[in-house]
Amino acid sequence: MSSVVLFDTHAHLDQPDFDPDRDDVVARARDAGVQHIVAVGTDLASSRRCLELAAAYDGVHAAVGIQPNYVADAQHDDWQQIVRLAERPGVVAIGETGLDRYWDHTPFGLQQDYFDRHLRLAEDSDLPSVVHMRDCQEEVLAMLREARRRGTLCGVMHSFTGDAEMAAECVALGMHISFAGMVTFKKSDGLRACAATIPDDRILIETDSPYLSPHPLRRVRRNEPAHLVHTASVLADVRRVTIDEFARGTTANARLLFGLT
């Protein structure tokens, strides 16, 4: 078992990719030092499943929400059920929410409506939000600024791919910055340079599994939480600290953010 203690802040453990061997996936994560995993919902059914997984496995926690590419499929009562789920034990965050212009699955105005709902629910619930962003940096920042004007903003920019300027503003607004496997890719020099600028108390790591397998496992079709160590190792090098120091710091950040201290 690894002596490194890691926290995977974003994994889609509920997805069918893990159905054949989910117990083994969680066991491998523990053997690799991943003591905590946030299982992140993408719609109502997914959020319910994440809550079930949080109840079934020690160290697994749930985030509940409707991801922007899924909000067009939400039924009329789905949002109210998400609101009720947010009150359940085991829920540590609201999301995955945010905006996405890359995929044309949902009208952008509807995405903005649901992003606002999630941010307000997070504020009302005193929980952090989990923010997805793709090809819409300015629109996301505009909504985060508005949320910050209403009160305290708390959350995580999931699988961050923006630049250092955006990261700095997100941190100033109250957000944490989380890096996934993309930061390990050979052509991701700019993203690694950005990661070097994040304050020690605001940086997090994640797998976004089953997606985004890190180098040297990019050819592995299914990513899993045990692979988090590769991302941690690269970021430790970038930030010129030992992997143990980096792991301890990011785990402490995540525990504080998700109320697990």
Image: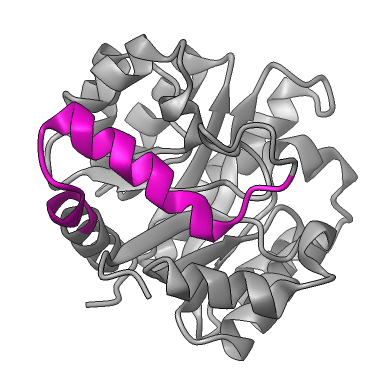
Residue 234 at x, y = what percent? 31, 34
In the depicted structure, whether residue 184 falls above or below residue 28: above
Magenta run includes residue 223: yes
Whether residue 197 is visible here, answered yes or no, is yes
Please give left or right for residue 38 compared with residue 82 in the image. left
Residue 192 at x, y = what percent? 31, 21
Residue sitting nearer the eye, 134 or 127:
134
Residue range in magenta is: 222-247
Identify the residue shown where x is 72% and y is 59%. 79
Residue sitting nearer the eye, 108 or 247:
247
Q: Quadrant of the C terminus?
A: bottom left
Please give left or right for residue 126 compared with residue 131 in the image. left
Magenta run includes residue 242: yes
Residue 254 at x, y = what percent? 29, 60
Please give left or right for residue 163 compared with residue 120 in the image. left
In the depicted structure, whether residue 221 falls above or below residue 38: above
